[in-house]
Amino acid sequence: MTKQHVAFKLNGKQVDVLVEPRELLVHTIRESLSLTGTHIGCESSHCGACTVDLDGKSVKSCTVLAVQANGSELKTVEGLADAEGLHAVQQAFIEEHGLQCGFCTPGMLIRAYRFLQENPNPTEEEIRWGMSGNLCRCTGYQNIVKAVQSAAQTLQKA
Amino acid sequence: MIPAQFEYHKATSIQDAIAQLGAHEESKLLAGGHSLLPMMKLRFAEPPHLIDINGIEELRGIRLDGDTICIGAMTTENELIQSEILQQHCPLLVEAARLVADPQVRNRGTIGGDVVHGDPGNDHPAVMLALDATLVLHGPDGERQTPANGFFLGTYWNDLQEHEILVELRVPVIKKGVGHGYHKLKRKTGDYAVAASPVVVELDGDVCRDIRIALTNVAPMAIRAEAAEAILRGKAIDEALIDQAAREVVAACEPAEDLRGDALYKSNMAAEMARRSIRAALQQARG
Ligand SMILES: Cc1cc2nc3c(=O)[nH]c(=O)nc-3n(C[C@H](O)[C@H](O)[C@H](O)COP(=O)(O)OP(=O)(O)OC[C@H]3O[C@@H](n4cnc5c(N)ncnc54)[C@H](O)[C@@H]3O)c2cc1C
Ligand code: FES
Ligand code: FES
């Protein structure tokens, strides 16, 4: 199968990669572009560890073809922090102990980043609903919910 | 898990998609990809060509045309949830979409893909039956319209013809005296239904002029519980009648036994979902 050129903006930088049509976006990000923050958990569209932000929407990058990202704007967990330091959601996960093993965390962070733009002042129930595409085997979710609540407050003050 | 090799094509219009389906043997349309890509990763499907219809603007969006709501096949679940037209004129679709999968899947998965895919666990086919929707299909010979009732023939089997594409779904605006109900039992957020039941009731004063009770994931495909409907039609519905109808729902079910439960459990859960949806629909219809 002929490889195809795919170009998109990744965390603000223009990138260009050659991919097979069957290549999944998560593999392109991790293997061709060497950004391994985005994790592969279930590989079957369930766990959300592979969540990335594609044109302003949270998607599971194990269930999108790399060729479909052509011309898009993509953000991964590596794109959250900036010169001034960690993003408010990252800081909140540290402070509220929103992680244990950390495997689900990149997906949680990039989803929380988008969710808080969709709903800047969510109730606990709305957080649970909005974060329901991300599974965690360690925390029992309690502190993840607290972290998202705390990040919401920080972002609203900013 | 990586799919088998295929050629990727992007369709630019409905006409172009139909032409490409004709030009590439055994090709498949790629909509949201959230049923097709998982099946390809498992190598349950190995289409040699994928025709991506995500770029076709005319397949997206929701518009009101008199008493009919027209929904483009490529409208995503999240777009259904956010639609003011649907919130106001067809709350059943909003409720159903809220219970499909999870936020990320709802950003990609489309109503059209859900309706034609053919997994008995897909939620929209039964919703289309309850709403008495019309499917608008385009093929090499032009456009045809067909009622949802009769479209679903079995698991991964429906009346979609070769090289046809589902373009639009048409559902009626909810009117005074009409009520919608939707209940879905699932083991956890993001799971397919153990059983679900969308119900639409039309009242004439206290009397049920018409009722449609549809069921998800308790038969090879989405079905209507017609014997149950017959018990309620033309009557002033009370709890005793609902009980009688629920027994007919159990009789209509022929679920596959799997990790979600055995046949007896699933059939009875379907009846309970129908019972709750009937009550909710009546309450809404009474205003
Ligand atoms: C974790 C997870 C949980 C899920 N939970 C649920 C759930 O609770 N309820 C539910 O209903 N679904 C659920 N789904 C399935 C999801 O909703 C899919 O998105 C949907 O079934 C298919 O829609 P799609 O747009 O992704 O279609 P695709 O996967 O792209 O396509 C599915 C099939 O339909 C064909 N097709 C698509 N569009 C058209 C068209 N316009 N004309 C003709 N043929 C077309 C394709 O060729 C393909 O054969 C879940 C999926 C996942 C991954
Ligand atoms: S790896 Fe993509 S959802 Fe689990
Ligand atoms: S912290 Fe271990 S999976 Fe979430």
Image: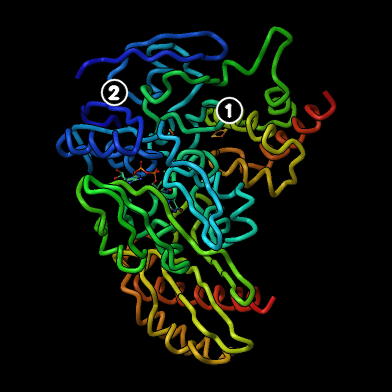
Q: CA distance from mark 2 to mark 1?
A: 23 Å
Res A19 → quadrant: top left
Residue closest to the eye, B101 or A91: B101
- Residue on which the image places disc 2: A21
- Residue on which the image places disc 1: A56
Residue closest to the eye, B199 or A80: B199
> Farthest right residue?
A157
Quarter containing the N terminus of chain A? top left
Chain ID for label 1? Answer: A
- Marks 2 and 1 belong to one chain: yes
Report the amino acid beneath label 1.
Answer: Gly
Report the amino acid beneath label 2.
Answer: Pro
- Of the residues under marks 2 and 1, which one precedes in the sequence? 2
Decide if residue B61 is on the left or right side of residue A31: right
Decide if residue A77 is on the left or right side of residue B56: right
Q: Secondary structure at mark 2?
A: loop
Q: Residue at x 28, y 19 (%)?
A: A20
The vertical placement of B282 against A5, above or below, is below
